[in-house]
Every structure is written in C-alpha cells, then in structure tokens.
Amino acid sequence: QVQLVESGGGLVQAGGSLRLSCAASGRTFSSYAMGWFRQAPGKEREFVAAIRWSGGNTYYTDSMKGRFTISRDNAKNTVYLQMNSLKPEDTAVYYCAAHVGWGPDIAVVTHWTDWGQGNQVTVSS
C-alpha cells in the first residue's frame, strides 16, 4: 500500500518561499508519477505539478510555471515542491499524490490513485 507523508507547510509572508516534501513508501516507484495538488477554501482541488519518477519529466500548471519547481530524490523516495514568490492566492492545503503511469490526463484530479494527508500553506499579505 502506498503511503505518502507530507511536511514543510506553514505560514509565510507574500514574496517568501517554502519547500514541501512528500516521503513515499510501500511500493517501488520507478513506474510512478508523483504530483502536487492544492485546494483553497470553497474551491475545487487543482493540479499544481507532476514529475515522472523514472526519467524526471515534469509538467506544471501554466500559472505556476517559473515560481514552483517539482523535484525528486530517488535515494530518499521523496518528492519536493519548491515554492517561490508566494502570493496570498497560493494559500491552500497542498496534497501529494501518486499513480502509475504518465499520460495526457496527468492534470486530472480523478486520475490519481493515492493521496497524502494534506499540508496547510498560508501566505499573508
């Protein structure tokens, strides 16, 4: 069973940075994609970024490209989301997710099978 444990959220001022971590266990992840999603109060969960565990291909939502960077550490089975130039509208619960494969529906929430518990990120103005 896949387990995803997130850490690194918190409160930051606008313009600041945070790095989220997602430690994965329970599987061999070489065939997996790992992703980050977020959900703000009263809004639907939305795709942020994804990375292919084998090969390191990445994909981002256009609005976050250039500010957010997804990466992985194979030795630690950990995926990261580096968030820079944070804005108050980035305030949300951020979720790590995993599923087998990589394809054109990578940004579709329902495509992902395994989820972390969520981690609050609050950006103050």
Image (cartoon, rainbow, N blue to C red):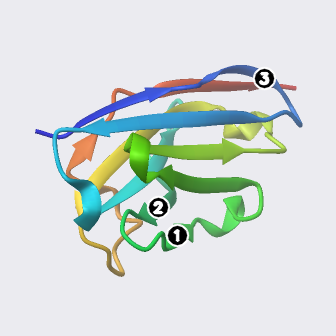
Query: Can you say whether 53 is above or below 121 in the image?
Result: below
List x then y, in percent, for residue 21: 51, 35
> Which amino acid type corresponds to the residue marked 2 in the rendered image?
Ala
Percent x, y of residue 90: 69, 39
Say if 114 sits above or below 4 in the image: below
Is residue 2 visible in the rendered structure shown here? yes
Query: In front here: 81 or 31?
Result: 31
Depth order, front residue of 105/54: 54
Type of the residue with mark 3: Val
Cβ–Cβ under 8 Å for marks 2 and 1: yes
Q: Mark 3, residues whose alpha carbon is within 10 Å: few (<14), some, or many (≥20)?
A: some
Residue that badge 2 annotates: 50
Q: Could you tell me how far apart the alpha carbons at marks 3 and 2 are, in whole angstroms?
A: 23 Å
Callout 1: 10 Å neighbours few (<14), some, many (20+)? some
Q: Position of residue 14 (x, y in %)?
A: 86, 32
Q: Residue at x 29, y 52 (%)?
A: 98
| Between marks 1 and 3 in the image, the one whose residue lies nearer the viewer | 1
Q: Secondary structure at mark 3?
A: strand
Q: Disc 1 marks which amino acid?
A: Thr
Determine the CA span between mark 2 and mark 1.
Answer: 6 Å
Quarter occupied by residue 17 = top right
Query: Mark 3 or mark 1, which is nearer the start of the sequence?
Result: 3
Residue position marked by numbered label 3 in the rendering: 12
Q: Secondary structure at mark 2?
A: strand
Pointer 1 residue? 58
C-alpha distance separating marks 1 and 3: 26 Å
Pointer 3 or 2: first along the chain: 3
Quarter of the picture holding the N terminus = top left
Q: Which residue is most to the front?
A: 75
x and y, in percent, of residue 48 in the image: 54, 55
Badge 1 marks a residue whose secondary structure is strand
